[in-house]
Amino acid sequence: MEKICKGDEVIIIAGKDKGRRGTVRARVDSERLLVEGVNVVKKHTRPNPMKGIPGGITDKEMPIHISNVAIFNPATGKADRVRVKVEQVEGGRKKFQRTRVFKSNGELVKL
């Protein structure tokens, strides 16, 4: 289970966008995230009349490493860490339920 998932609100803790908040749009791979409004770069595109693409300079969001991001805890208003709480389900022998909780106060992480 990943500690940061799509739809989570995160704070950037390192890099040029340090201190900004945004929601996770997608996980590119196991170590990189696309965060809304963060790590925006200029992309120069060439016009292609065959595909109907106009040329010019556009803004594009690039992935950010997961180590530069911390999940936002709305109860404290600060960045927090997440742990995975494992509980055994009743009626099952080897059935476990995994939930994400904040380390500081033990509340569930809501999507």
Image: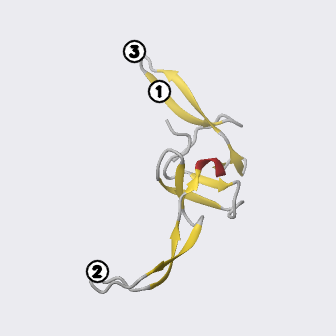
* Mark 1 neighbour density, 10 Å: few (under 14) some (14–19) many (20 or more): few
Image position of 68 (left or right of 43): right
Closer to the observer: label 2 or label 1?
2
Residue 99 image point, x, y percent: 52, 33
Image position of 4 (left or right of 14): left
Closer to the observer: label 2 or label 3?
2
Q: Which residue is mark 3?
A: 91
For the residue pair 33 and 94, the one nearer the viewer reads as 33
Is disc 1 placed on a helix, strand or loop?
A: strand
For the residue pair 48 and 105, the one nearer the viewer reads as 48
Q: With respect to residue 56, does 10 lie above or below? A: above
- Tell me the CA gap for discs 2 and 1: 49 Å
Task: Report the amino acid beneath label 1.
Answer: Gln
Q: Which residue is mark 2?
A: 51
Say whether residue 70 is visible: no
Is disc 2 placed on a helix, strand or loop?
A: loop
* x 68%, y 63%: residue: 17
Earlier along the polypeptide chain: callout 2 or callout 3?
2
Q: Which residue is mark 1?
A: 97
Is disc 3 placed on a helix, strand or loop?
A: loop
Q: With respect to residue 74, does 36 lie above or below? A: below
Image position of 25 (left or right of 47): right
* x 26%, y 83%: residue: 50
Earlier along the polypeptide chain: callout 2 or callout 1?
2
Task: Report the amino acid beneath label 3.
Answer: Gly
